[in-house]
Amino acid sequence: MQAAERQGFPDEARHLEYFSVPEQPDYVNHAFTVKLSETGKEFEVPKDKAISDVLLENGVHVDVKCADGICGVCKCGLVSGDVEHRDFVLSKAQQQREIVTCQSRASSEGATITLDL
Ligand code: FES
């Protein structure tokens, strides 16, 4: 990936696929709100749960496979909100408009993320 970047391949032309979870930084979880753009429904996401957990608990279907941020199955459209992207699958360009719901979270306590759901 570094060699491709040095050679000038754009971000969207580079892809790295993980088969196990790479080492992650020591993230700090915050509670936040997730809002669905289609219905306007809002759900609180506590510190100890993922967006995908909360959606499923509230009857909102989202596919989940790895739950580790490496497969991309749980991604959905991101309408607004500052996100701490914790996945290993989306490109920087994709992270501007998509979110991996099993791992990524709002970047600050009490913030709201609006999903294209
Ligand atoms: S279920 Fe695999 S990235 Fe979320």
Image (tube, helix red, strand yellow):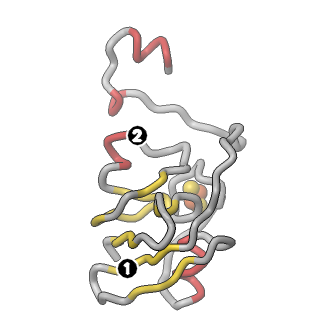
Ligand 1 is located in which of the four quadrants? bottom right
Question: Label 1 amino acid?
Answer: Lys
| Residue drawn at point x = 45 percent, y = 77 percent | 33
What is the count of numbered marks? 2
In the rendering, at what x and y percent does residue 71 appear? Answer: 57, 51
| Residue drawn at point x = 51 percent, y = 54 percent | 72
| Residue drawn at point x = 30 percent, y = 55 percent | 97
Up/down of 41 relative to 98, above or below? below
Of callouts 1 and 2, the N-terminal one: 1
Task: Please state, as top left, top right, bottom left or bottom right, where the C terminus lies in the image.
Answer: bottom left
Cα separation between marks 1 and 2: 23 Å
Rendering quarter of residue 13? top left
Instruction: Determine whether, in the image, residue 74 is placed left or right of residue 11.
Output: right
10 Å crowding of disc 1: few (<14), some (14-19), many (20+): many
Residue identifier under label 1: 35
In the rendering, at what x and y percent does residue 103 appear? Answer: 58, 59
Up/down of 65 relative to 13, above or below? below
In the rendering, at what x and y percent does residue 30 appear? Answer: 58, 66
| Residue drawn at point x = 55 percent, y = 77 percent | 45
Helix, strand or loop status at disc 1: strand
Question: Label 2 amino acid?
Answer: Ser
Judging depth in this view, the residue of 41 and 25 nearest the camera is: 25
Judging depth in this view, the residue of 35 and 82 nearest the camera is: 82
Disc number placed over residue 91 in the picture, else none: 2
Helix, strand or loop status at disc 2: loop
Up/down of 36 relative to 27, above or below? below
